[in-house]
């Protein structure tokens, strides 16, 4: 089972920046993709960005050009650098990992979430 622990959320003014981190731990064969979702009050959870084992990235249209996802595979850590933040970026941000367990079954794990609030 994989555990994901997020950090880096907080309160930031519009136009500011934040860097979220997510560390994956536990028994697994490999992580196939890892990324970030967010959920604002009253809204559905949506993909922000993810990165595959091969390094391919995918971004939501709403964050393209402002957000960069990166990873340190040796540390099982994924980062989300967010710049030019807007009030509409306010949400609970969740880390998600799609991984293969030791029996090579594909599974998914979610973190507890880290709050990002963009407000003046």
Image: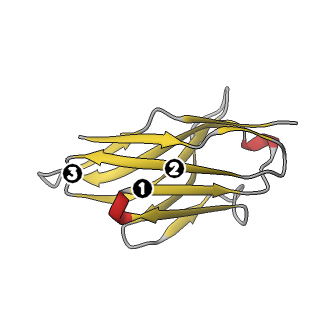
The mark nearer the N terminus, 1 or 2, is: 2
Judge depth for marks 1 and 3 and give the one in front: 1
Residue at the left extreme, as displayed: 103
Q: Secondary structure at mark 2?
A: strand
Q: CA distance from mark 3 to mark 2?
A: 20 Å
The quadrant of the image that shows the C terminus is top right
Q: CA distance from mark 1 to mark 2?
A: 7 Å
Whether residue 107 sits left or right of residue 33 in the image: it is left
Residue at 42% in and 55% down: 77
Label number found at residue 77:
1
Q: Which residue is mark 2?
A: 21
Residue at (58% x, 55% y) in the render: 80
Residue drawn at x 53%, y 41% is: 7
Q: Which residue is mark 3?
A: 28
Give how far across and how far down residue 90 sits, in percent: 72, 38
Given residues 16 and 98, the one toward you in this image is: 16
Counting from the top left corner in percent of width and height, residue 18 is at: 68, 50
Precedes in sequence: disc 1 or disc 3:
3
Residue 13 rendering spot, x and y as whole percentages: 83, 42
Whole-percent x, y for residue 93 in the image: 58, 40
- Looking at the figure, which quarter contains the N terminus? top left
Q: Nearer the viewer, residue 36 or 45?
A: 36
Q: In the drawing, does residue 60 fall left or right of residue 87?
A: left
Residue 63 in which image quadrant: bottom right
Q: Furthest-right residue in view? A: 120
Residue drawn at x 66%, y 33% is: 40
Give the side of residue 62 with respect to residue 76, left or right.
right
Q: Which one is closest to the eye, mark 3 or mark 2?
A: 2
Which label belongs to residue 113? none
SS at badge 1: strand
């Amino acid at each position: 089972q994989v555990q994901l622990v997020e950090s880096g959320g907080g309160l930031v003014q519009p136009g500011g920046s934040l860097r979220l981190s997510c560390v994956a731990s536990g028994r697994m064969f490999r992580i196939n993709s890892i990324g970030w979702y967010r959920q604002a009050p009253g809204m559905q959870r949506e993909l922000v960005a993810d990165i595959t084992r091969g390094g391919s990235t995918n971004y939501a249209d709403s964050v393209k050009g402002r957000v960069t996802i990166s990873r340190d595979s040796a540390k099982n850590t994924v980062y989300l650098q967010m710049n030019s933040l807007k009030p509409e970026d306010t949400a609970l941000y969740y880390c998600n990992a799609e991984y293969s367990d030791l029996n090579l079954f594909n599974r998914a794990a979610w973190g507890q979430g880290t709050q990002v609030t963009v407000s003046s």
